[in-house]
Amino acid sequence: MVELKHRLCAILSENFGASAEELNDGARFEDLGLDSLALVEFSIVIRREFGVEVDEDELHPEQTLDDAAGLLVGKGVPA
């Protein structure tokens, strides 16, 4: 799952300005400055990057990078 998390970190860094210091497994999206609207944008980027649909109610500000990676693995994205 390390590679998947690395790709998610790259997306958060490149598209949402999250710094490398902020990006750790336990960092919540709200700690990274992502609100509900930003998470909708994040789900769009995920769809383009990984080819899976993430509904707007599947990502929440209090979730973590680990939660997002687990969600994607559950949708068939290789860990």
Image (spheres, grey):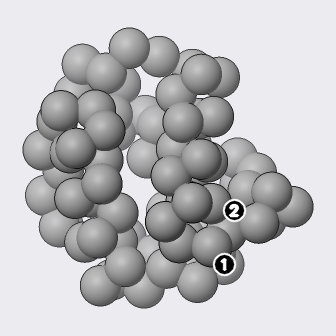
Q: Nearer the viewer, residue 59 or 50?
A: 50
Question: Disc 1 versus disc 2: distance between alpha carbons?
Answer: 6 Å
Spot occupied by residue 56 in the image (x, y as percentages of width and height): 17, 67
Q: Residues within 10 Å of mark 1 (few under 14, many from 20)?
A: some
Which image quarter is the N terminus in? Answer: top right
Q: Amino acid at mark 1?
A: Asp
Q: Nearer the viewer, residue 56 or 45?
A: 45
Q: Nearer the viewer, residue 18 or 32?
A: 18
Q: Amino acid at mark 2?
A: Ala
Q: Which residue is mark 2?
A: 27
Q: Which residue is mark 1?
A: 31
Image disc number at residue 69? none
Disc 1 + disc 2, Cβ < 8 Å = yes
Q: Is residue 19 left or right of residue 39?
A: right
Instruction: Please say if 75 is above or below 52.
Output: above
Spot occupied by residue 79 in the image (x, y as percentages of width and height): 47, 16
Q: Residues within 10 Å of mark 2 (few under 14, many from 20)?
A: some
